[in-house]
Amino acid sequence: MIENRTLGSKIFDVINVIIMIICALLCIVPVWYVICVSLSSKEAVNAGLVSFWPVGFNLFSYQKVLGESDFFRSFWVSIQRVLLGTGVSMFCILLAAYPLSKTSKQFPKRSIFMWILVFCMLFNGGTVPWYITMKGYGLVDSIWGLVLGMGLNVYNLILAVNFFKNLPAELEEAALVDGAEPWKCLVLIFIPLAKPVIATIALFTIVQYWNEFFRGMVLSARQSNYPLQTYIQQLVVTYDFSTMNVEQIAQVQKLNKQSLDAAKIVVAMIPVLAVYPFLQKYFVSGITLGSIKG
């Protein structure tokens, strides 16, 4: 295919590239700066000498964050929360999206349920009624409280509904003619074709469960039940100098709150960054195919 490129189109392409580079830098530079601060010395951070490269390179902040006895326990709580929460959310979303993707003729009550979902997106009962409900069901200090307390993300459900709407209706009609039941249509036709939107929703759900810390703080009476985000938010540098030798005191004095906070952010980002490359190829197609259909 021969494309006739005018001067205007070439200028437009150059401007697009420049804008994309600027957007990429706006995303990358803050993350890189946080990494540099976490690896810099206390004196350099306090003096504001850190810019785009660590000054006085050290790993003291990471040793503090990773060296706590409760760190790996909180990490395991977060892993359980993400796995259980993603599994439960995907199960509920797919079961709900299948009937809601039908027409009003096929599912007469569809409009009522969709309006209820829109209402749930806009309004909620508040923190106090939510906590009373969770406590009434015995979900305080429970892994299931951390999972079910997040609820169901209506935006993800609508994304799946619109994806299912875009699938050819002839596929399901042919399966029904051959005697397939709705369960088989969902499991054997819709779900295999919905890999892009499933991967996209799974990524959103993983990030949501991984980054959430407030509910973990409210629903966990004991620190041993904290998920990782709640744990690192509550982590405070406290030392008993009376029990330390001279070398330990010297190491402690090399720490500061800003570097420690930066190390917390970096540690919290790593698992999500590790998962994203495996789902990235489905991400864009899942977003576009799951967009609103007129």
Image (cartoon, rainbow, N blue to C red):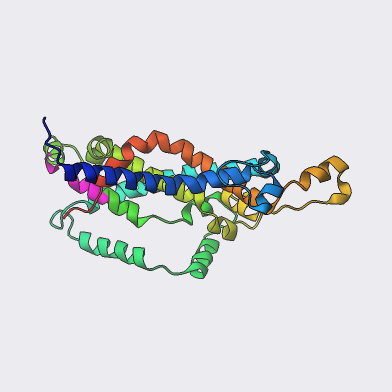
Work out whether residue 286 or residue 180 is closer to the camera in this orientation and state it: 286
Query: Residue 164 lies in magenta, yes or no?
Result: yes
At which x and y percent is residue 261? Answer: 62, 51
Q: Is residue 139 visible?
A: no
Q: Is residue 259 left or right of residue 207?
A: right
Query: Based on the displayed image, in which of its 4 quarters is residue 117 positioned?
Result: bottom left
Residue displayed at 31% across by 52% down? 157
Name the spot of residue 252 as percent of width and height, x first: 77, 46
The residue positioned 51% from the left and 39% from the top of the image is: 271
Residue lying at 49% horizontally and 65% vertically, measured from the top left: 130
Q: Quadrant of the C terminus?
A: bottom left
Q: Kindly tell me whether residue 105 is visible in this rendering.
A: yes
Q: Please state the extent of the stretch shown in magenta in the rendering.
A: 161-170
Percent position of residue 200, x then y: 34, 43
Residue that lies at the very extreme toward the front in this rendered image: 7
Majority secondary structure of the magenta segment?
helix
Please say if 189 is above or below 81. Answer: above
